[in-house]
Image (cartoon, helix red, strand yellow):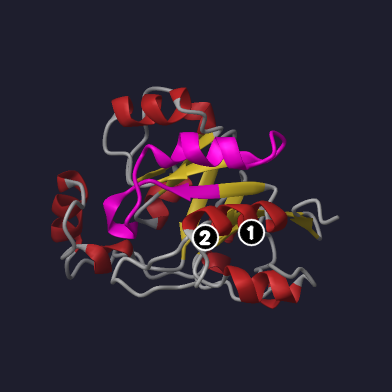
Amino acid sequence: MFNGIYNGTIIIAEAKVWSPRGERLTQNSWEQQIESAGKVGRMVSVLTHPIWRRSPDDIKKARKILPSEIKILAKGFYETDDEVQRAVDDGADFVLVVGRRPKVHLERCFLEPLTLAELADIPVSLWAVWNSRDLSSLKDLPGIPQFLLERWKQMDGCSDRKRESFKEARAIRLGPLCQASNLKTVADIEPGANAVLVGSHLESFAASLGITI
């Protein structure tokens, strides 16, 4: 049975049924996708924001479905510390927070910076995420936190706008770093990735591991 680690890289499998743009990514139900993610990942990413047609309540639902040894990463934007606290209270082992550093449960957070400068400033004791997708492409969707909209507006046309590769991010990051987005098979895992977050292409990624889901 696969233990969720491939060549030393932790697999975080995401239960994603819908894309933010309304594309259905699997014929599985959400519950089936949670079960499938549990077969692939050492950790399962549970989406909690409406742009993925999901809710914070899904953390409790996922915890009832998944084996106790599978960790849960709550994935949204987590605009406030109260939201982070609720995710932990509901059973999340970790919380992915975008564009800021919470004052609660920091040791449980996966921090996703918007720039390389922010990445370099994250303490080496914490998890960081480098997403190959520029999340500002989501700015026209409802429910995006205001602080992110304001930051993206400030960054428009700025040379500091996020466009760097994972390799560039890894070069400046001494602590643990998770590679996110656009992973279709194990061949897409970048050297130096301590973890990978696999979302839209979970089925093809699982197949590349020899796992049928």
Mark 1 neighbour density, 10 Å: few (under 14) some (14–19) many (20 or more): many
**Which one is nearer the viewer's eye here, 159 or 74?**
74
Above-or-below relation of 57 to 38: above
Q: Quadrant of residue 1?
A: bottom right
Residue ID for mark 2? 169
- Residue kind at label 1, given as amino acid type: Ser
Q: Residue at x 50, y 72 (%)?
A: 27
Q: Which residue is drawn at 55% across and 59% down?
A: 33
Above-or-below relation of 210 to 7: below
Magenta stretch contains residue 87? no
Residue ID for mark 1? 36
Q: Quadrant of residue 11?
A: bottom right
Q: Position of residue 197 (x, y in %)?
A: 56, 58
Q: Position of residue 182 (x, y in %)?
A: 51, 73
- Residue kind at label 2, given as amino acid type: Ala
Let me know if residue 143 appears in the view: yes
Region in magenta: 45-71
Q: Is mark 1 on a helix, strand or loop?
A: helix
Q: Residue at x 40, y 22 (%)?
A: 104
Q: Where is residue 78 in the image (x, y as percent from the top left)?
A: 32, 39
Q: Quadrant of residue 166?
A: bottom right
Q: What element carries label 2?
A: helix
Could you tell me how far apart the alpha carbons at marks 2 and 1 are, in whole angstroms?
A: 30 Å
161 lies left or right of 113: left
Q: Residue at x 20, y 58 (%)?
A: 152
Earlier-in-chain disc, 2 versus 1 = 1
Let me know if residue 95 appears in the view: no
Magenta stretch contains residue 54? yes
134 lies left or right of 182: left
Tell me the quarter of the image containing the C terminus: bottom right
Furthest-right residue in this view: 1
Q: Where is residue 140 in the image (x, y as percent from the top left)?
A: 15, 65
